[in-house]
Image (spheres, helix red, strand yellow):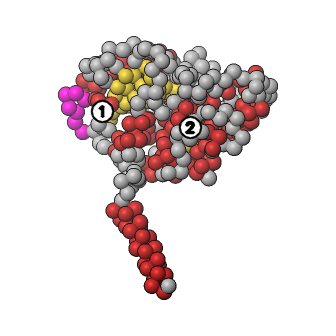
Amino acid sequence: MLKIKVFVGLFFVFSSLFYFVENNLLGSPNKPNNTITPIEIPETTSLTNTEELLRKSSTKFFEESLLRTRFNGAILVAHNGKIVFEEYEGLKEVIKGDPIDSATSFHLASVSKTFTGMAVLKLWEDGKLNIDEKVDKYISGFPFHQITVRNLLSHRSGLPNYVYFAEQVGWNRKKYLHNDDMLKLLIANRSRLRIGKPNAYFDYCNTNYALLAIIIERVSGKSFSSYMYETFFEPIGMTNTFVFDINKTEKVLPSFKYNNRLEPMMFLDAIYGDKNIYSTTRDMLKWDIALSSGKLFKQSTLDQAFRGYSYERKGVKNYGLGWRLYELPSGKKIVYHNGWWHGNNTVFSKLMQDSTTIIVLGNKFNRNIYQAKKIAGIFPGYGIQMEDDE
């Protein structure tokens, strides 16, 4: 009996030692490389021929499409992480205030979804959730039992958009709607709302990403803001990026209509996950470099995020997990997201095969911002018409 106890004891000792060595010294093949250090944007000294063409294309777009339409914001274009074009135009309050500069943080609007989506995928990589599990595993009382986390990520849940249904079911417009309020409205009014069949079709819906923010908080045990800061913003060195706090509205950049009139705050402004991350063009370039470095995510995870999930309709446009896509006949792919909330317009585009990043952020409504992908015209295989998808 004593020999058996000694053998069992030694077995557990060596098993624990093997586990420690494999996971902490050798590194487990099932885990991503999380050793990321703050990103340093490389100095731009000289440009290659390709980068010079890219700079000229960016300059043309900036002067002909943005300046002529009284653009107020920032634009940055990079190739292989190196800035080839960067401009800041206008004043923080459009007709007054300090000039916009590289430290000016803009409301990303729906470009925020790229962070929310990747945060969920980070929890997936860390083994804390399964994106193919039903949502009701992570949100107790969620009544739509067939919807998975992946359905939320890919906008294939069939859920209605809170932007439209909240007021319809009786929410008081004089009160800010928060994420948990939205969830309660969804549950309480499930018989009144039109719910589609899960995974049957693509339907872009802000509700999906407000729910994902709740899942991030419940799985991580942290606030959405804290999780984003600790997981992405602080490690990457995104010093001017943050999640909006409805109690600190006076500290963020205001937005304006096309005619310079201020866009007032309203009852939907407290919800996050689908929006409400603020950032700069340079911080967004750091986000892009971090995603491309292989240190934040495994390539297999990025492949899941950057592939299309909706092919019910023919065409080049699709949606991944937190990312819009142009999947072109040439084989080229643009991974991107646009944003539009109040007077804020945003574009974040990655030309995958040509290692080019296009970032445009504005706080005065300007539809021409969404045409920024035209800059890609110097590369073959991008014969596409640009649309104002948000």
Give the mark nearer the N terminus: 2 vs 1.
2
* Residue furthest bottom as drawn: 2
Q: Which residue is mark 2?
A: 149
The x, y position of residue 294, in whole percent, is 35, 46
| Left or right of 148, for residue 37 | left
The local secondary structure at tag 1 comes to loop
Residue shown at the point (55%, 23%) measured from the top left: 200
Q: CA distance from mark 2 to mark 1?
A: 30 Å
Q: Which residues are magenta?
A: 45-51
- Amino acid type at circle 2 is Val
Badge 1 amino acid = Ser
Identify the image quadrant of residue 259.
Answer: top right
Q: Is residue 23 left or right of residue 153?
A: left
Secondary structure of residue under mark 2 = helix
Residue 138, image quadrant = top right
Q: Do the numbered discs 2 and 1 sit on residues whose CB atoms are within 8 Å?
A: no
Q: Is residue 28 visible?
A: yes
**Position of residue 177 measured from the top left corner of the image (x, y, whole percent):** 72, 33
Which one is in front, 234 or 387?
Answer: 387
Q: Is there any visible trace of residue 270 in the rendered image?
A: no
> Where is mark 1, residue-wise?
355
Mark 2, mark 1: which one is toward the viewer? 2
Whole-percent x, y for residue 112 in the image? 53, 34
Q: Position of residue 176 (x, y in %)?
A: 73, 34
Q: Residue at x 44, y 70 (%)?
A: 16
